[in-house]
Structure formats: C-alpha cells, structure tokens
C-alpha cells in the first residue's frame, strides 16, 4: 500500500491512485499535507503533482519495510533531477533524499499516514539554502541575508 503510493503514485505522477489506495476518510498528518477526508486526499494528490513537476524522472526506492498489525513503516529514498522550478528556477541538480513513512492500513486502504521526507536535504540539493544566504539586492526593500 505505502510502497504503491510512493513508487506508482509519486514515482509516475499518477495522483489518481490516491482514490484507489486511500480510504475516503484518510487522516493525513504529514506537515504541509495534513487534513482529513477529501482535504487530505486532495493534499496528497497535489503533492504527487508537485513532486512530479519538480522531478519528472523521480524514482522511489523502498529500502526497508515492516508491518505489525495494521501499521506499516517504510524507509526509502527519492532520487531524480530537479528540472522543474522549486523556490526559483530549475537547478537541474541531482536529488537524493531519505523518506520515512508510517501508515495505518485497514481493508487494503490507507486510513492514516505520517510522512517525513528529508526536506532540508531537498532545499540544500536544489540550491534553495544557498539562495537564502545571499544578500538581498540593493534597493529591493528586503533585509540583507547573512553574509
């Protein structure tokens, strides 16, 4: 279930899998995607589209997975090329981030999810962190960054 959402949903950009693999009353806890029911499902669909816009060649690899009762834990990686814009123009950088996922699955559908993608690594690898440290252009009205 969790593996399919990652590899077939996020990995191919197929947001329609959310309707198939997630319960109508999904509870989503992941920062930026949190919600319940239709809101949660729409947030996950939007995330799939955003990830695929950033890295159309993204590949998700599951490195470890364990299921205990109705709880599934997955540790994996997302790798691709940042050919889409991300807080600025495309960096064309190679991306490799760690993922930690936990989900509760009932009757073959995800009913609750917690996710922790390494967003700090994503920001560093796409150059966003460097841009945040650059001084603001003179006359821009923005405070000068550290530097």
Image (cartoon, helix red, strand yellow):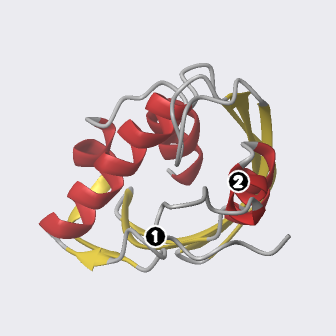
Q: Nearer the viewer, residue 121 or 23?
A: 121
Q: Is residue 108 left or right of residue 24?
A: right
* Number of residue marks: 2
**Secondary element at tag 2:** helix
Q: Residue at x 17, y 68 (%)?
A: 39
**Of circles 1 and 2, which is in front?**
1
Within 10 Å of disc 1 (Cα), the crowding (few <14, some 14-19, many 20+) is few
**Secondary element at tag 1:** loop
Q: Is residue 6 left or right of residue 130?
A: left
Q: Position of residue 43 (x, y in %)?
A: 29, 59
Q: Is residue 36 left or right of residue 97?
A: left
Q: Residue at x 52, y 49 (%)?
A: 87
**Mark earlier in primary sequence (1, 2):** 2
Which quadrant of the view contains residue 145?
Answer: bottom right
Mark 1, residue position: 141
Q: Residue at x 75, y 46 (%)?
A: 127
Which quadrant of the view contains residue 108?
Answer: bottom left
Q: Position of residue 140 (x, y in %)?
A: 48, 61
Which quadrant of the view contains residue 32?
Answer: bottom left
Q: Is residue 98 above or below residue 13?
A: below
Q: Nearer the viewer, residue 69 or 29?
A: 29
Marker disc for residue 92: none
* Distance between the alpha carbons at the discs numbered 1 and 2: 17 Å
Q: Nearer the viewer, residue 52 or 138?
A: 138
* Residues tagged 1 and 2 counted as in contact (Cβ below 8 A): no
Q: Nearer the viewer, residue 69 or 26?
A: 26
Marker disc for residue 131: 2
Q: Is residue 59 above or below residue 128?
A: above
Q: Is residue 13 above or below residue 95?
A: above
Q: Residue at x 55, y 30 (%)?
A: 11
């Amino acid at each position: 279930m969790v593996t399919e959402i990652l590899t077939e949903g996020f990995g191919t950009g197929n947001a329609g899998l959310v309707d198939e693999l997630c319960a109508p009353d999904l509870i989503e806890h992941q920062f930026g995607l949190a919600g319940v029911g239709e809101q949660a499902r729409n947030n996950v669909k939007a995330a799939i589209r955003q990830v695929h816009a950033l890295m159309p060649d993204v590949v998700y690899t599951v490195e470890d997975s364990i299921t205990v009762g109705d709880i599934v834990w997955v540790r994996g990686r997302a790798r691709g090329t940042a050919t889409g814009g991300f807080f600025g123009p495309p960096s064309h950088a190679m991306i490799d981030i760690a993922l930690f996922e936990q989900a509760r699955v009932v009757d073959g559908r995800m009913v609750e999810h917690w996710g922790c993608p390494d967003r700090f690594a994503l920001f560093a690898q796409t150059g966003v962190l460097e841009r945040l440290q650059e001084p603001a252009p003179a006359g821009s009205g923005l405070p000068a960054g550290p530097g």
